[in-house]
Image (cartoon, rainbow, N blue to C red):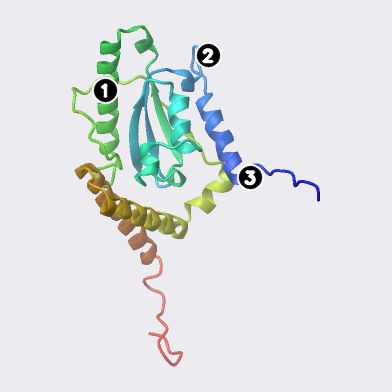
Amino acid sequence: MPKAKRQGVPADVEAIRIAIAHGLDWRDDQNRKVGDSKFGVYAFFDYDGEPIYVGQTKEKLRVRIRRHLTNHRTDAVAMNVLDPFEVADVEMWPLWDLKNCKPAEAAARLNAAEYSVFQKVLSMSSFGAVLNEKNIAATEVVGLPRSVRVRIVPEALFEARKHPDVRIARRANTISSLAKVISERDVSPGLRRTLVTQAKRLQLLAATRFEEFEDDPIEVEGGEQT
């Protein structure tokens, strides 16, 4: 029997990978690809435009972001803090000038940029929180470079993935998995805080979805409606 030809990843997964690569290849006015910045800060946003995660990198934005969103595992994904399926948009702040700094200075400026982005997205959040399980060290708030925000979900997939029932099911599963991790390990308070934030996100989405049906007649036994 001839060996079956190995299939690639599903079409929707491949489409999102292409969209991620395209976003990371966005060029600035100096013809630099944003993903090639060795130092940078990034934020993930869900399908409602809610900020859900903030991070920094010293190994190129493209490497770190792809590790989160594709097949490379990170602590945030492995611990069920972040569901890559929830990420619709990525905003990036490349810090090109840090490549010429001494390591200690670069680290300090990178931390300050991350904290400044963190404060920025908290002000945008309906919950005043994101899903980061680790505290972002407080520094002074600094000016940020021009950011680049890209959608990583192609339009053809966006509406289907945005459907609230799909996202409710995903969030409920994420909460269950995260709660299981917490029940089996001695975890940080930050991970418990993330569970609370995820629960609030699920409650709001489920309540908003319910409101769409609140005025519908309710069927009762015998076929009558109230």
Q: Nearer the viewer, mark 2 or mark 3?
A: 3
Residue drawn at x 44%, y 93% is 222
SS for dot 2: loop
Question: x, y (%) of residue 35?
Answer: 48, 23
Please identify the quarter of the rendering in which residue 97 is found: top left
Q: Mark 2 — residue? A: 31
Q: Mark 1 — residue? A: 111
**Mark 1 and mark 2: Cα distance apart in space:** 26 Å
**Mark 1 and mark 3: Cα distance apart in space:** 38 Å
- Taking the image as shown, residue 24 lies to the left or right of residue 57, namely right
Image quarter where the C terminus lies is: bottom left
Residue drawn at x 60%, y 40% is 14
Q: Mark 3 — residue? A: 11
Label 2 sits on what residue type?
Asn
Contact check, label 2 and label 3, Cβ < 8 Å: no
Contact check, label 1 and label 2, Cβ < 8 Å: no
SS for dot 1: helix
